[in-house]
Amino acid sequence: MRSVLKQIIAKNKQEERDLRLARQAEIENPKTADDRRSFLKKTALGGIAMTGMMGLGIEDTIAQTTSKVSRMSAPSELKITDMRYALTNVMGGTAIIKIETNQGIYGLGEVRDAADVRYALFLKSRILGKNPCNVEKIFKSIKQFGGPARQAGGVCAVEMALWDICGKAYNVPAWQLLGGRYRDKVRLYADTPQARSSEEQKKLIDYRMNTQGYTWLKMDVAISSLPPDSGTLVNDKFWRDDNGRLSQWGDARNYMSYGNTMHPFTQIQITEKGLEMLAQRVADVREMVGWEVPISTDHYGHFDLNNGIRLGKALDKFRLAWLEDMVPWQYTEQWRTISEALETPTTTGEDIHFLENFKPIIHNRSVDIVHPDLASSGGLLETKRIGDYAEEFGIGMAMHQAGTPVSFMANVHCAAATQNFLALEHHSVDVPWWESLVKTVGGFKMIDKGFATVPLTAPGLGIELDEEVVKAHLHPSDKTFFKSTEEWNELRSHDRTYS
């Protein structure tokens, strides 16, 4: 028995020595951020000094080695002290937030692409002074302020940052806090914009597949790309913009615009000629890509479920990976009608917030695949719950992502921890400086041959900002860089939703 106990003690001593050396190596690594280095120095005495136990009895030594090994911080004493932001130029304006604590560690989060950073700043007064490691407790207190699509951006940004802090406090990757991982790398699908010519399209595809190694692509099949006055659409002239084209996204300030009109109400129809032209566009891409690579499709335009079924049937023969967002996600019964009519898998979900709003579409088996955007669906834990819930109904989960490397890595941790995960979107393949916005902790390669690397040892999200690169790519509308946000410190309302 005593020999077994001695082996345990020896093992614990070795583990502490290894941890001490790893900590010192990270302190001395020039890539380590200053605040991370300061944090490691402050907590260097957090572990047990094994040499001080030499005079203890064997039972006392066991008690010491099993109760206090390698405390990386004092998690129970952590308090949120601040929230600041930097507005990057990714996707026309995507804010990264930084939540700071009383122990010198901070967490990174991201307000979804094109969402107002004030969705997050509004929450600052509601989280100050709280322990960031109580992630679920804080999430439940602020989720009432999140709505569909980008209205949930603030809630999700905070949730991401809390997991980053928590992982750093306990010195484990975020995926470990979600229950462990199913995979060491995460398959990506590369968004591929529509080119003006087949030659340009071939270059885009060749770059993704042969240069970067992606094994899954996504393309647009948009009615707005059909030539005007060509007999391809019915009833489209009423909706054209000043350039004579259908404006997919519309003018947010004009409630009468095409982009602000839900699909069933535009009364746009696709003629047989239009269907043939759209099918030919997909056929051309399928010929370029081959049949071994999945092709997903998106951004068709605003038309009703009948035209969605007609288009879907015209594309069935190309064995697409999925048809995405053909009608708004709110139309649960319409989605089921479309799904039952087609052989091609269907998906929606990038604008759905929180598990309770995914449940109807999952219960009804309205789609074949759920497609949450973690920056809208509730963050890491809530999105994993969505995936787990869908799995019970035999439904897979792909993940939409169009932000900075901060939300990208949050997605990677969630995907690693979710069994029915299929593929994660990468929307900035053609942005040369995108990956350099952050430095990976330990120097792992963030994306390798079409797969994201799951950090196996780096704590939290596994990244730190490269501040100089972020400063070089701030959005023109706001060049401040993590400035003081004291004006958001004061709580001005009683927010409980019940009497």
Image: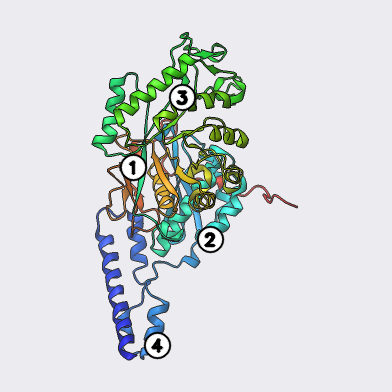
Label 1 – label 2 distance at C-alpha: 28 Å
Identify the residue at image location x=35%, y=45%: 187
Residue in the picture at 37% in, 58% down: 459
Q: Are marks 1 and 3 in contact (CB under 8 Å)?
A: no
2 and 4 marks in contact (CB < 8 Å): no
Q: Earlier in the sequence, mark 4 or mark 1?
A: 4
Q: Residues within 10 Å of mark 4 (few under 14, many from 20)?
A: few
Q: Which residue is mark 1?
A: 437
Residue assigned mark 4: 60
Q: Of label 3 and label 2, which has the lower sequence position?
A: 2
The quarter in which the N terminus is drawn is: bottom left
Measured Cα–Cα span from mark 4 to mark 1: 48 Å
The crowd level at tag 1 (other Cα within 10 Å; few <14, some 14-19, many 20+) is: many
- The amino acid at mark 3 is Ala
Instruction: Say what secondary structure mark 1 lies in.
Output: helix
**Residue 47 in sight:** yes
Q: Amino acid at mark 2?
A: Asn
Q: Which residue is mark 2?
A: 134
